[in-house]
Image: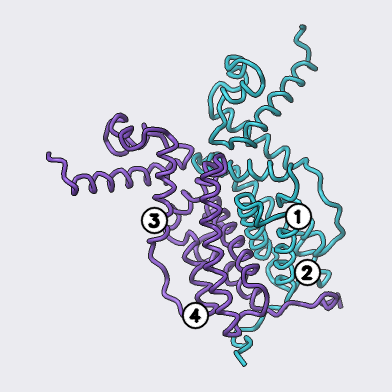
Chain colours: A cyan, B purple
Amino acid sequence: MPRTKGNHEARRRDVSEAVWRVLAAHGFGGLTLRAVAAELGATTGLLTHYFPAKRDLVAYALDLLEQRSASRPRRAAGAGLSAVRAAMLDILPLTAEATDANRIWVSSWDAALADPALSGDHARRYAQGRDRLRDLVAAAQQLGELPAGDPARIAAGAQAFVLGLVVQALFAPTAFPPHRQVELLDDYLASLASPPVPHGDRTVPS
Amino acid sequence: MPRTKGNHEARRRDVSEAVWRVLAAHGFGGLTLRAVAAELGATTGLLTHYFPAKRDLVAYALDLLEQRSASRPRRAAGAGLSAVRAAMLDILPLTAEATDANRIWVSSWDAALADPALSGDHARRYAQGRDRLRDLVAAAQQLGELPAGDPARIAAGAQAFVLGLVVQALFAPTAFPPHRQVELLDDYLASLASPPVPHGDRTVPS
């Protein structure tokens, strides 16, 4: 078979699919050339052509995760608080696809924390996510749907909340089915929308 | 040297220390008999006596993590919201020790998600954590420091928030130094303490 550009692209797609399936089933801890080769029905030798070292495979998998996350379908949303809500819903493991992607993200944290360069890449990705949330929070404030306050600080809290909810839902899918995750997110957004209680002005027991 | 109980205990402590140091530096992805042996200055052969299979080493490391987390020093706190706050502060990576422990917890998620039994153990640990928070939330509600509402649901939200903040702080220690983490936690608690805004009663743009 002639080595055409089309074949090359098709092979790349096959490799990406195989890497994704290995990650979804076994995480980064189970990501080996051997496992990807088995999934692909190819030899380990062929794969060393793509990934000379284990680190290349990990870096490729992280890029793949970022690309797939960036190109995933997003909820349509208006401006304001509903856009903040939609952006947070887009992250949660509410579907099988989103569960796979989140399982891979959470798994990637071990691989990334062990390597300063990969860790820096992840830090940059999460900072970008916070910046996007910050802009949505600021727009919601302008519409009067969220109280005043540093939008970057509110966005950092919101990202913390949603990442932790992802972790909880992955470990306990029965305790955190989709409707429960949405309920908890809506509780969080309702708290954000409440005007802050001044110090010393809390309800006292009656 | 005679094989006494004291020697045995001392050797167990050495092994635990070596496993902990490997985890703090390389995570579960870097946890191998060879790495622990090198850290311990022992042979891999000696370690296979303790850990016949890789899975035994992972299970041991997870137990060690749980024991060290359970026995870590806790902040003294009164009842009510200050006890909720103290329990959440106890989790955050505010010191070097707490950063190591959290880095190991986050790293353990990959290992745990890849194995149904380990994943179930983690789910149980987090459920216990939520139950403890739930009781503290209920006490704060009784003192009138938190508004009414299902305390288990509030605890699930609080645990999500704190776990996600841990992840953010591990990847971006410069963006999330201890005082920033405490600020974000206090923002979160202030939101919880605000009475919820009834639907349709949000501030409108002026």
Cα separation, mark 2 vs mark 1, equals 19 Å
Check disc 3 and report the residue beneath it.
B68
| Vertical arrangement, residue B93 with respect to residue A45, above or below | below
For mark 1, what is the residue?
A: A89
Q: How many numbered markers are drawn?
A: 4
Residue at x 36%, y 31% (from the top left corner): B34
The type of residue carrying mark 2 is Gln
Secondary element at tag 1: helix
Assess whether mark 2 and mark 4 are in contact (beta carbons under 8 angstroms): no
Left or right of B195 in this view: B170: left
The residue tagged with tag 2: helix, strand or loop? helix
Q: Amino acid at mark 4?
A: Ala
Q: Which residue is mark 2?
A: A141
Q: Is residue A199 above or below residue B33?
A: below
| Chain label for disc 3 | B
- Which residue carries the number 4 mark? B79
Q: Position of residue B51 (x, y in %)?
A: 36, 36
Which of the two discs, 1 and 4, sits closer to the camera?
4
Q: Position of residue B100 (x, y in %)?
A: 43, 52
Query: What amino acid type is highlighted by mark number 3?
Result: Arg
Determine crowd level at label 3: few under 14, some 14-19, many 20+ residues with C-alpha closer than 10 A. few
* Circle 1 crowding by C-alpha within 10 Å: few under 14, some 14–19, many from 20: some
**Which-is-in-front pick, marks 1 and 3?**
3
Residue at x-position 75% and y-position 10%: A3
